[in-house]
Image (cartoon, rainbow, N blue to C red):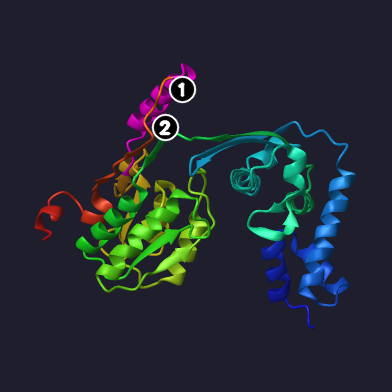
Amino acid sequence: MAITAAVVNELRQATGCGLMDCKKALIECEGDMEKAVMYLREKGLASQAKKASRVAAEGMAYATVIDGVGVVVEVNCETDFVANTDRFKNLCRDFAKHIAAAAPASVEEMLAQPFYTDASKTVNDLIGEATASIGEKISVRRFARFVAEHGMVDTYNHMGGRMAAEELLASGSKRPVMIAAVHDKMLPAYDRFVGFCSVMREHGLEERIFETKENDSLHGDYSKLARQVLDTFPDADGVFCTSDQIAASVVRCAAASGRRVPESIRVIGFNDNYLAACLCPPLTSIRQPIPEMCEMAIECLIKQIHGEKVPVDMVFPVTLSARESTRGPKGEEEKRP
C-alpha cells in the first residue's frame, strides 16, 4: 500500500499524533492502518512510562453536569502552555464525560475502563496517545461524581432549537444549517438539534446539519470550524449555532468571505451572553435565564444541606433575543411579515 499524504493525514486525524510519527508508523506497519494505530498506541504507552517520573503540577479542574450527573475532574500536565491548549481542554472534557457515563469508583478503575465512546481502547490508552502527541506527562489526579436525584436545574433546550429554526425561516432563510454536536445525546446541544430538525420537517425542508465535536462550553476561537461550515454549505442563507462563541466566528468568517449578515446569511447563537449584543451586527440569540437558574440552584443546594425537600426538576423557559444578525437594522424588522 502506498503511503500517501492522505493516508498519513487519516491516521493523524484518528490518533492525534504528529505527521512524522504517523508516517513512520505506516512505514513500519507496511501501510496497514489498524496495525499503525496499535503501533502508535504502544508507542504512546512507552512514552507515558518514560515521562512517569516527571512532575505534572499544571493543568485544570474541569466541571460539567450531564443529565443530572455532576462531575469535577482534575487533570495535570507539565506546563501552563499545554494546559491552555484546546487539545488539553478537550481531553479534560472527554474524561469528565467518561466519568459521568461509566461511573468509576476510583482513578485506578477509571484508567482501566474501556473509553465510553470507543471500547477498543482504555482511558489509559487515551492518556498514552495524548502524552505521545502533546509531549508532556498527562495524569488524572482525582475526580468527584455526583448524582442529582432531585433539584435539577435546566432550560428547555428542545424549544430553543425550535425557536432558532422558526426565527431563521421567518427572516427569509430558505436553506438554513445547524452546527450541532449530535454524537452525544447527553449534551444539551443534542436536544437543540432535535428541536431544530422538528421544525425543518414540519416545513418540508432538508435537515442540513454540520456535525462537530466542538465543545460549546469552552471559550475559544472557532474560526476553523466556521470556515468548514461555510465551505461545506456554500449556499447556506442561515446558520444556527449552539453557542454565541461559535456564532461570533461564523459572523466574522462570513464577513471575511464577502457575505453580509443578515443580507445574504442570517446567524443565530445560543445563551445570549455579553458577547451577543456587542458584535457587529448584534447577534440574535436564544437566551437562557442564567441568573435565575443560578439563584434557584443555590437555593436548592442550601435546602439539601439543611435536609429540606426541594422541587424535583426545574426547567426554565428560553426566550428569543432578536437582533440585527437575523432582522437587519431597526426599522427593517417592522417591514417583515
**Residue identifier under label 1:** 304
The answer to whether residue 326 is left or right of residue 130 is left
Question: Which residue: 42% across, 66% down?
Answer: 209
Task: Determine the image quadrant of residue 205.
Answer: bottom left
Residue 283 visible in this rendered orientation of the protein: no
- Determine if the magenta segment contains residue 303: yes
Tell me if residue 174 comes above or below residue 222 in the rendering: below
Instruction: Count residues near mark 2 (Cα–Cα under 10 Å), then give few for <14, some for 14-19, many for 20+.
Output: many
Question: Which residue: 29% across, 42% down?
Answer: 317
Residue 213 visible in this rendered orientation of the protein: yes
Residue 151 circle label: 2
Task: Determine the image quadrant of residue 75.
Answer: top right
Pointer 1 or 2: first along the chain: 2
- Determine if the magenta segment contains residue 96: no
Question: In which quadrant will I find the C terminus?
Answer: bottom left
Which element is circle 2 on?
A: loop
Question: Which residue: 63% across, 40% down?
Answer: 84
Q: Main secondary structure of the magenta part?
A: helix
Of 221 and 98, the residue lying toward us: 98
Which element is circle 1 on?
A: helix
Q: Which residues are magenta?
A: 287-307
| Separation of marks 1 and 2 at Cα, in angstroms | 9 Å
Question: Which residue type does callout 2 highlight?
Answer: Gly
Q: Are marks 1 and 2 in contact (CB under 8 Å)?
A: yes
The answer to whether residue 164 is left or right of residue 22 is left
Question: Which residue: 46% across, 71% down?
Answer: 232
